Image (cartoon, helix red, strand yellow):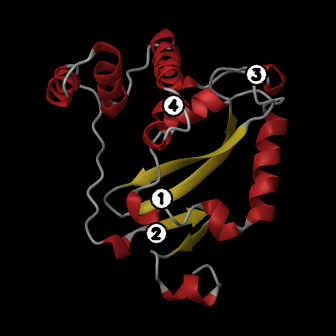
Amino acid sequence: MTTRPELLVSPSLPPPLYDFSPRKIKGSRWWSAARGAAEHDSDSCCYVCGINKGQTRSGRLFGHEVYDINYETFTVTLREVVVLCRRCYNFIHFGRLLRQYLEGSVSQGYVRRVLRDGLSILSRANIKPLAMQRIHYLVLEQGASQYDARECAIRENLTIDKFDPGDWSQWKIVIDGKKYGSPGAKEWLAEGIL
């Protein structure tokens, strides 16, 4: 299997749609099938680093949705579902990992390993990290202030999140060619999603 380190810098679901992921819209049966197909397609290996699930500490891989986002039309399109090892998954969802650290459920050492491993994968693939990934590294690993880390990311011309929420009700998500309106929209209510 060819690894895909570029997934580490793929865009996340915009905040207006956080609670309306494809797995919530389509249901657990759909999610299990999509995740299972992704694991089968990858021969049970992480799409990013290639580790086999049998070699991971937990013995499992985590499903992750990959999106195309059009910020001008407020449209998020599910491109695919992939499977990731715990470290690659946590690198992509670093904000979630930081919350877990602050709650005491993961160690600072683990957070640092996730960050170093993810940045190492990107470096070997000659892919620039996202600005927030670099900022987290500079703050956690080198003791930089938030201000200095942000200035460094800007100097390095790293991609800063483009998200400008506008009217949150304008956001929509497309799954398998079907468009679902923004949270609270009539069609979501009619389908029992909300």
- What is the CA distance from the residue labelled 3 to the residue labelled 1? 27 Å
SS of the residue at dot 2?
Answer: strand
- What is the CA distance from the residue labelled 4 to the residue labelled 2? 26 Å
Do the CB atoms of the residues marked 4 and 3 lie less than 8 Å apart? no
The three-letter amino acid code for the residue at tag 3 is Met
Residue beneath label 4, please?
91
Expressed as whole percent of the image width and height from the top left, the position of residue 61 reads 74, 35
- Classify residue 161 by image quadrant: top left
The three-letter amino acid code for the residue at tag 1 is Val
- What is the CA distance from the residue labelled 4 to the residue labelled 1? 21 Å
Expressed as whole percent of the image width and height from the top left, the position of residue 8 reads 51, 30
Residue beneath label 1, please?
76
**Of 108 and 69, the residue lying toward us:** 108
Relative to 15, say whether 55 is above or below.
Answer: above
Do the CB atoms of the residues marked 1 and 2 lie less than 8 Å apart? yes
Residue beneath label 2, please?
172
Identify the residue shown where x is 44% and y is 43%. Answer: 99
Query: Label 3 neighbourhood size at 10 Å, few (<14), some (14-19), many (20+)?
Result: few
Expressed as whole percent of the image width and height from the top left, the position of residue 85 reads 68, 30
Label 4 or label 1, whichever comes before in sequence order: 1
- What is the CA distance from the residue labelled 3 to the residue labelled 2? 33 Å
